[in-house]
Image (tube, helix red, strand yellow):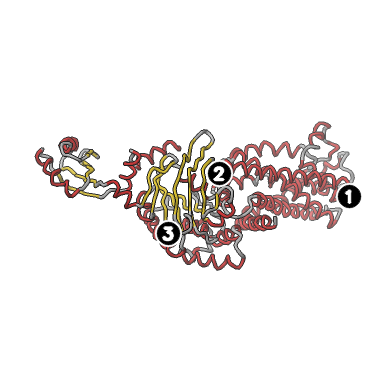
């Protein structure tokens, strides 16, 4: 167990190194949340005049959900990194070392968590600059960043599971493009829950992204409802465990085709 | 005397779609030996290597690396064996050194042991100057040396190389051969390599096995195999394009199998080239066929392949490649 964790950390360093080497990735990953927060909160500034948002600025309303949404939107593409590693024979080589097999998946998921956390910090910082700091203070920051990392890990695992199943980047991209929009719109990341039609709200209840948005929004408050937050964090944890198990299983299934 | 370094018995494996990659493959490699698995594309060489490297699971049969079963005792096999895959698997965005350090960590080497081992391998393979550049900037030959270094990192006693020189330029290939020969001497390694270059096997392998359609068709030392043929080939280049006439003329002689290579060249297989030549030339002169040049060659591995499979090696290789596409 400890050895598997050590293997994962060593592989995580490989992902981080690659991430830093590719300065374009780094810049895009950090610029996206800043730009997104700026444009979105300006564009929808007046939307909070609608009933349902309560007494808040749109930037303050959207920041926690935006962190979670951007974390999910970025990490869902990480399956393409896995396919690239498969095509280049990296995975095959790793599988013939003494490293625990699970570390191949685990390290990628940790990487998803790291990148998403950084992005969440940028999002919240931008919100603060837009005069909408996290009401919950330090606890709020930790809560939003932690929830974002969980969501990103879960979606990265799903992306890996699909990637290891289809094993073609084009196919994976097509599937992700198809899934990303409905996933976003079937959540209250951008709009108050009470403004969603009844049937969409029902579907949103099944959306892990929505669990993350609700948990993050709750934890960002000055006085969170801990029961609600714990509830959604629990759901998210289950989602992460299930999707990671699925990703590990698809890696095992790939191995059996060799 | 301990058992063989590598013992492969009756290995069988089929892929989805019913392609039978291994069909009762059997061979053994002694410790300290360089053993070549030779065969056309699609013969089952890569599958064999992947089974030994614990990457692929066999459907049947047994393979043991220093006595450890590749399926039941995969951990021990991974510690004892280094794998140089056909597709590199090196991280292009990292430097050569970073790749080696990571490999050492993943092979669970002791932390203090990793840096000295990296330095040792960089020196051994003569790639120290480029070690801190990214792999994406390396030439094919340098990259291949790092592939070998990765496999050697945890000091395995056996390395298996899947087509180590495929895709390299001829000069680079020859340099790589010298490198591998040096490794055998310096690291006291046992080596199993697959190749579809006959001259590579001839140069490097102490013993070799020809693989065809998932089984070993013949094995021995290169000279044993060639001697076993008891055949020389005599190539005659004719002044004018009367190869067919020449073949007909030579057919009269005993113990000579002649065939036209093209209109001006005839190749004949005989037990002793030098002894048979006067009679051959006499026969051709009698028919007024002028010979421009004569070459006598001992049997090649190509001849061995032809004798055991009834197919020319290069032809089989191309044919399998076409099927594979």
The local secondary structure at tag 3 comes to: helix
User: Residue B238, located in which quarter of the rendered image?
Assistant: top left
Q: In this view, which residue lies farthest toward the top?
A: A199
Subunit under mark 3: B
Residues A217 and A225: in front is A225
Q: How many marks?
A: 3
Real-space Cα separation, disc 1 to disc 2, in angstroms:
53 Å
The answer to whether the residues at label 3 and label 2 have Cβ atoms under 8 Å apart is no
The local secondary structure at tag 2 comes to: loop
User: Residue B259, located in which quarter of the rendered image?
Assistant: top left
Residue at image point 60% right, 68% down: B112
The reply to whether residue A19 is visible in this rendering is no
According to the picture, the residue beneath numbered tag 2 turns out to be B57
From the viewer's perspective, tell me whether residue A181 is left or right of residue B125.
Answer: right
* Rendered location of residue B184, percent (x, y): 43, 61
Nearer the observer, disc 3 or disc 2? 2
User: Residue B100, located in which quarter of the rendered image?
Assistant: bottom right
From the viewer's perspective, tell me whether residue B308 is left or right of residue B109.
Answer: left
Q: Is residue A73 above or below residue B161?
A: above
Residue B115: which numbered mark, if any? none
From the viewer's perspective, tell me whether residue B54 is left or right of residue B38.
Answer: right
* Rendered location of residue A209, percent (x, y): 76, 42
Real-space Cα separation, disc 3 to disc 2, in angstroms:
28 Å
The local secondary structure at tag 1 comes to: loop
Residues B190 and A198: in front is B190
Lower position in the chain sequence, tag 3 or tag 2? 2
According to the picture, the residue beneath numbered tag 3 turns out to be B180
Residue at image point 48% right, 52% down: B6
Q: Is residue B192 above or below residue A255?
A: below
From the viewer's perspective, tell me whether residue A139 is left or right of residue A242.
Answer: right
* Rendered location of residue B281, percent (x, y): 13, 44
According to the picture, the residue beneath numbered tag 1 turns out to be A224
């Amino acid at each position: 167990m400890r050895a598997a964790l050590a293997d994962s950390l060593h592989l995580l360093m490989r992902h981080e190194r690659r991430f830093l080497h590719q300065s374009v990735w780094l810049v895009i990953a950090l610029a996206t949340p800043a730009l997104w927060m700026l444009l979105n909160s300006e564009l929808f500034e007046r939307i909070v005049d609608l009933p349902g948002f309560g007494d808040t600025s749109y930037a303050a309303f959207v920041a926690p959900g935006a962190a979670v949404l951007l974390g999910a939107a970025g990490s869902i593409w990480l399956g393409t990194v896995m396919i690239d590693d498969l095509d280049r024979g990296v995975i095959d080589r790793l599988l013939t070392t003494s490293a625990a097999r699970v570390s191949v998946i685990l390290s990628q998921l940790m990487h998803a968590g790291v990148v998403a956390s950084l992005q969440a910090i940028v999002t919240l910082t931008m919100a603060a600059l837009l005069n909408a700091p996290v009401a919950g203070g330090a606890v709020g920051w930790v809560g939003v960043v932690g929830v974002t990392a969980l969501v990103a890990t879960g979606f990265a695992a799903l992306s890996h599971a699909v990637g290891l199943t289809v094993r073609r980047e084009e196919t994976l991209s097509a599937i992700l493009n198809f899934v990303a929009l409905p996933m976003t719109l079937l959540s209250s990341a951008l709009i108050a829950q009470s403004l969603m039609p009844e049937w969409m709200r029902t579907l949103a209840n099944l959306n892990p992204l929505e669990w993350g948005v609700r948990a993050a929004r709750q934890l960002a408050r000055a006085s969170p409802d801990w029961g609600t937050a714990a509830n959604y964090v629990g759901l998210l944890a289950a989602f992460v465990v299930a999707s990671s198990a699925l990703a590990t299983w698809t890696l095992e299934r790939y191995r059996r085709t060799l | 005397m301990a058992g063989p370094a590598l013992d492969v018995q009756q290995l069988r494996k089929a892929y989805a779609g019913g392609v039978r990659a291994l069909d009762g493959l059997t061979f053994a490699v002694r410790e300290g030996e360089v053993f070549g698995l030779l065969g056309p594309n699609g013969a089952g060489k890569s599958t064999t290597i992947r089974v030994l490297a614990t990457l692929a699971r066999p459907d049947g049969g047994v393979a043991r690396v220093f006595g450890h079963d590749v399926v039941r005792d995969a951990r021990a096999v991974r510690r004892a064996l280094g794998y140089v895959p056909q597709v590199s698997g090196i991280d292009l965005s990292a430097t050569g050194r970073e790749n080696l350090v990571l490999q050492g960590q993943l092979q669970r080497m002791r932390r203090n042991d990793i840096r000295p081992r990296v330095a040792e391998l960089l020196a051994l393979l003569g790639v120290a100057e480029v070690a801190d550049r990214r792999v994406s900037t390396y030439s094919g030959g340098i990259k291949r040396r790092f592939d070998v270094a990765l496999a050697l990192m945890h000091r395995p006693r056996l390395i298996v190389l899947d087509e180590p020189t495929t895709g390299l330029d001829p000069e680079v290939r020859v340099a790589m051969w010298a490198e591998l020969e040096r490794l055998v001497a310096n690291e006291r390694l046992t080596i199993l390599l697959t190749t579809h270059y006959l001259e590579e096997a001839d140069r490097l392998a102490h013993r070799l096995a020809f693989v065809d359609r998932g089984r070993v068709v013949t094995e021995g030392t290169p000279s044993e195999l060639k001697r076993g043929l008891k055949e020389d080939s005599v190539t005659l280049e004719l002044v004018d394009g009367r190869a067919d006439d020449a073949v007909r003329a030579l057919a009269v002689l005993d113990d000579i199998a002649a065939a036209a290579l093209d209109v001006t060249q005839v190749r004949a297989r005989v037990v002793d080239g030098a002894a048979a030549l006067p009679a051959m030339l006499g026969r051709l002169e009698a028919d007024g066929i002028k010979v421009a040049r004569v070459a006598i060659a001992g049997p090649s591995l190509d001849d061995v392949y032809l004798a055991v499979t009834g197919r020319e090696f290069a032809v089989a290789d191309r044919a399998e490649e076409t099927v594979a596409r």
